[in-house]
Image (cartoon, grey):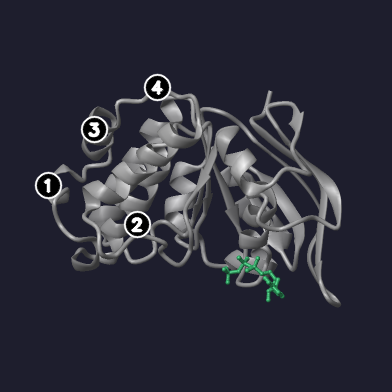
Amino acid sequence: MPVLETTGVSVRFGGNIALRDVSLTIEPGQVTGLIGPNGAGKTTMFNCVTGMQSVASGRVVLDGRDITGLGPGRRARLGMARTFQRLELFLSLSVRDNIRVAGDIVRANTRTRIDVEAETDRILELAGLADIAGENVAEIPTGRARVVEVARALMTRPKLLLLDEPASGQTEQESERFADLLRELAADGIAVCLVEHDLPLVMSLCSTIHVLDHGTLIASGTAAEVQRSPEVIAAYIGTEAVA
Ligand SMILES: Nc1ncnc2c1ncn2[C@@H]1O[C@H](COP(=O)(O)OP(=O)(O)OP(=O)(O)O)[C@@H](O)[C@H]1O
């Protein structure tokens, strides 16, 4: 069973249709890509999934449960977490405290028994951030700050992790390490969904890729399948081969 299923999701902003009848699934234990040109509706889709944007029509189903009417807090407690295109970190806090604070919130708002300090240490190691744990987030490079955001999301133990352009600002080396982290998370059973313009990264990481264009889902399939799709080539990839 997919972790997430959207059926016929549509969103309008005044006369502008941001999403038109979008039906897609995100499976556990995989990295799924959501790609498309600027303005295609990718972030709006994340907002619909996380409850930050209400839908004009359609349904959002998490683990077989219809969550279309639930707010972002309820959805987060049901097991979804996200990161943002524009970094949303506490700039005056250290890397460690940015991660720890999510654990404190989980402990305060749910009945989860969580050893916040131990879990913070585990996630710092897992995400490769232990060497900069004490540094202020304002002082670290953007590429690593993006990993801090992912690490903070992991403190909530999500089953669905939505990442909005997490590799932007990363060096090639950082993005290789980041890809390894996402593979590990998927191998652990998490459903990871990635909005990303770095196509070689998406193509190498994602088992399934959904392609949006002008709010419409124009293709879903493996990297090889979407790269062959004439609609995708015309709308987004162009004629140049993607490595
Ligand atoms: N709050 C809003 N009010 C009005 N229009 C919006 C709003 N949010 C998004 N849009 C419009 O909806 C469409 C989809 O935007 P969205 O940000 O979801 O695209 P995107 O695929 O994430 O783009 P990008 O790759 O540039 O981040 C665009 O036409 C955008 O201008």
Q: CA distance from mark 2 to mark 3?
A: 21 Å
- Residue 139 lies in what quarter of the image? bottom left
For disc 3, the neighbor class at 10 Å (few under 14, some 14 to 19, many from 20) is: some
User: How far, Cα to Cα, is label 4 from label 3?
Assistant: 12 Å
Give the amino acid at mark 3. Glu
Decide if ligand 1 comes within 8 Å of the CB at mark 2: no
What is the secondary structure assignment of the residue under circle 1? Answer: helix
Tell me which label, 2 or 3, sits earlier in the chain.
Answer: 3
What residue does disc 3 label?
Answer: 117
Quarter of the figure that contains the N terminus: top right
Q: Classify mark 1 as within 8 Å of ligand 1 or not, answering yes or no.
A: no
In front of the other: 235 or 140: 140
Residue type, numbered disc 2: Arg
- Mark 4 CB lies closer than 8 A to ligand 1: no
Identify the mark at residue 113; answer none if there is no mark: 4
Q: Position of residue 5 (x, y in %)?
A: 73, 37
Residue 4 image position (x, y, % from top left): 67, 36
Q: Amino acid at mark 4?
A: Arg
Q: Along the line of sight, which residue is nearer the eye, 154 or 227?
A: 154
Viewer-side label of 3, 1: 3
Which-is-in-front pick, marks 2 and 3? 3
Where does label 1 land, which residue?
A: 131
Residue bearing mark 2:
146
- Do callouts 2 and 3 mark residues in contact (Cβ within 8 Å)? no
